[in-house]
Amino acid sequence: FPKTIIPDNNGVDDITVITLINTLEYEAADLMIYDKNGYKIKVLHNNLLLSACNREVWDGRDAGGNIVTCGIYVLIADWCWAMKQIIRDFFHLFFPEVCMACGNSLYHGEKVLCTRCMLKLPRTHFHQHAENPVSQLFWGRAPIDYATSYFYFRKSSHVQHLLHQFKYKGKKEIGIFCGQMLGKALMESSFFCDADFLIPVPLHPKKQAQRGYNQSEVIARGMAGRMNAVVDVNTLYRK
């Protein structure tokens, strides 16, 4: 690109064309212009998807559209996002992330559970039916509107294995992940989609001290992110 840029609209060196050669096959980058004192002048591009050869144009103006003063300016290409992914993938060659249900290695993009186990989880779909077996348990016992459960539970199943790791092995990410799945499902139900608050059942203080967290609250926080609801941990408490 030109050594000197003179953005005076005379048709000569009004712009500079920046060429990026993507030899390491990065996926994306942020492009920013800095002055010689290290101040960011303008963001040319956020999360630019990269090909083998990329060209970007700078017209000598800052973020506010004003022509910059005479001086030296530097282009910074921030490859951090791509580099983090490369480092993560290299690390996983030796310490792979595994499915919390079956123990097999997770592929890129999979979290907590592999796709196979995700599809095989025994979902009840009770949230789509008002008079489901869970609701019937409360009939004549407590005045409720609706009730549901997300999975069927069977001994020695993947669901039992997940719950055991979540409750006793400190795998909080399982609770967040399952809460997100449940929250997404409830948002598709006319019975639960308008919930404003989520109130987790509190643990006995001794048990919470042993485990370090209340699993009901962890699940609720996963749900809240998908339901635009507030987690209320102050209304219900144990004496």
Image (cartoon, grey):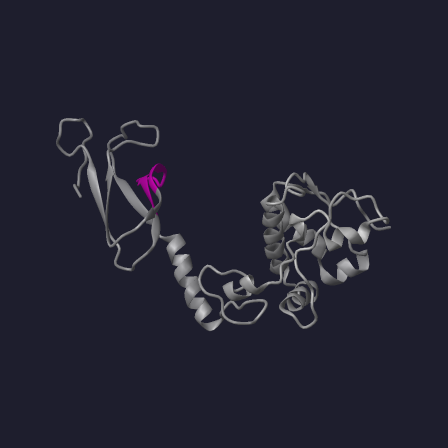
Q: Position of residue 106 (x, y in %)?
A: 49, 66
Q: Position of residue 60 (x, y in %)?
A: 25, 33
Would residue 94 be found to the left or right of residue 51 on screen?
right
Q: Is residue 188 or residue 28 the one in the foreground?
A: 188
User: Which residue sits at x=79%, y=44%?
Assistant: 144
Toward which corner of the image does residue 125 lie, by quadrant? bottom right
Would residue 146 be found to the left or right of residue 19 on screen?
right
48 to 8, vertically: above or below: below
Would residue 77 be found to the left or right of residue 118 on screen?
left
Q: Is residue 134 magenta?
A: no
Q: Quadrant of the N terminus?
A: top left
Q: Position of residue 199 (x, y in %)?
A: 73, 46
User: Which residue sits at x=70%, y=66%?
Assistant: 168
The main secondary structure of the magenta stretch is: strand
234 to 94, vertically: above or below: above
User: Which residue sits at x=35%, y=41%?
Assistant: 38
Q: Is residue 149 or residue 84 the one in the foreground?
A: 149
Q: Is residue 203 or residue 3 the one in the foreground?
A: 203
Q: How many marks?
A: 0
Q: Position of residue 178 (x, y in %)?
A: 61, 56
Q: Is residue 34 magenta?
A: yes
The magenta span reads 30-45
